[in-house]
């Protein structure tokens, strides 16, 4: 299906909240005692929040009426919109597949490699997204 233009105005507050959530999630993932499944989910959310913020800032949304699913669409839009390399697209696929297995089948076997992949992915997505906002919409960045 692909992304479609949104008719809603850009909410700087909503975009900023998603970016703040990403920063918080990356920090929260280092909390001692969490299961590998929880750490994976938190890191996934850190990256996905950036993708959501990017889509909202560009007045785009993923239709929820079929297709590959809104997570796929939003993450693909981020890769295209930021001109990220295919390696990020492949990481998207890996982390999305692992996330779906954990969420929808109850699988709890998140490997060390899965954690390494999702951590590297979340850090890269966050850095690229924040870089874009710094240049194109600095008013949406979280206050320090």
Image (spheres, rainbow, N blue to C red):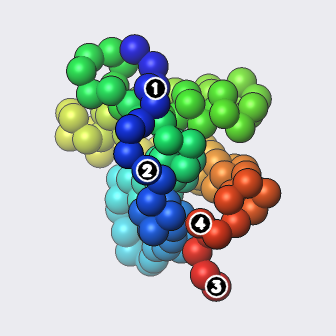
Secondary structure found at label 4: helix
Q: Do the residues labelled 3 and 2 touch (CB within 8 Å)?
A: no
In the rendered image, the vertical position of residue 65 relative to residue 48, given as above or below: above
Q: How crowded is mark 2: few (under 14 residues within 10 Å), some or many (20 or more)?
A: few
* Residue 116, numbered circle: none
| Callout in the foreground (3, 1) | 1
Earlier-in-chain disc, 1 versus 4: 1
The C terminus lies in quadrant: bottom right
Secondary structure found at label 2: loop
Q: How crowded is mark 1: few (under 14 residues within 10 Å), some or many (20 or more)?
A: some
Q: Is residue 80 left or right of residue 110?
A: right
How far, Cα to Cα, is label 3 from label 4? 12 Å
Q: For mark 3, what is the residue? A: 144
Q: Residue at x 46, y 30 (%)?
A: 5
Q: In this view, does 124 lie to the left or right of 70?
A: right
How far, Cα to Cα, is label 3 from label 1? 32 Å
Q: For mark 1, what is the residue? A: 3
Earlier-in-chain disc, 1 versus 2: 1
The location of residue 83, given as percent across then percent down, is 75, 31
Q: For mark 2, what is the residue? A: 9
Secondary structure found at label 1: loop
Earlier-in-chain disc, 4 versus 2: 2
Can residue 83 be seen here? The reply is yes
Q: Residues within 10 Å of mark 4 (few under 14, many from 20)?
A: many
Can residue 30 be seen here? The reply is no
Q: Residue at x 62, y 26 (%)?
A: 90
How far, Cα to Cα, is label 3 from label 2? 25 Å
Earlier-in-chain disc, 3 versus 2: 2
How far, Cα to Cα, is label 1 from label 4? 22 Å
Q: For mark 4, what is the residue? A: 140
The location of residue 53, given as percent across then percent down, is 51, 52
120 or 19: which is nearer to us?
A: 19
């Amino acid at each position: 299906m692909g992304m479609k233009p949104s008719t809603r105005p850009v909410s700087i507050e909503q975009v900023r909240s998603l970016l703040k959530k990403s920063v918080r999630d990356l920090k929260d993932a280092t909390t001692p005692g969490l299961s590998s499944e929880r750490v994976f989910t938190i890191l996934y959310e850190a990256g996905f929040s950036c993708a959501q913020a990017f889509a909202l800032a560009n007045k785009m949304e993923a239709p929820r009426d079929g297709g590959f699913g809104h997570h796929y669409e939003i993450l693909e839009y981020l890769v295209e919109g930021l001109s990220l390399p295919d390696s990020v697209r492949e990481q998207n696929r890996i982390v999305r597949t692992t996330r779906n297995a954990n969420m929808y089948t109850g699988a709890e076997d998140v490997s060390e490699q899965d954690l390494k992949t999702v951590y590297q992915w979340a850090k890269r997505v966050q850095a690229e997204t924040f870089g874009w906002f710094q240049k194109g919409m600095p008013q949406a960045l979280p206050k320090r």
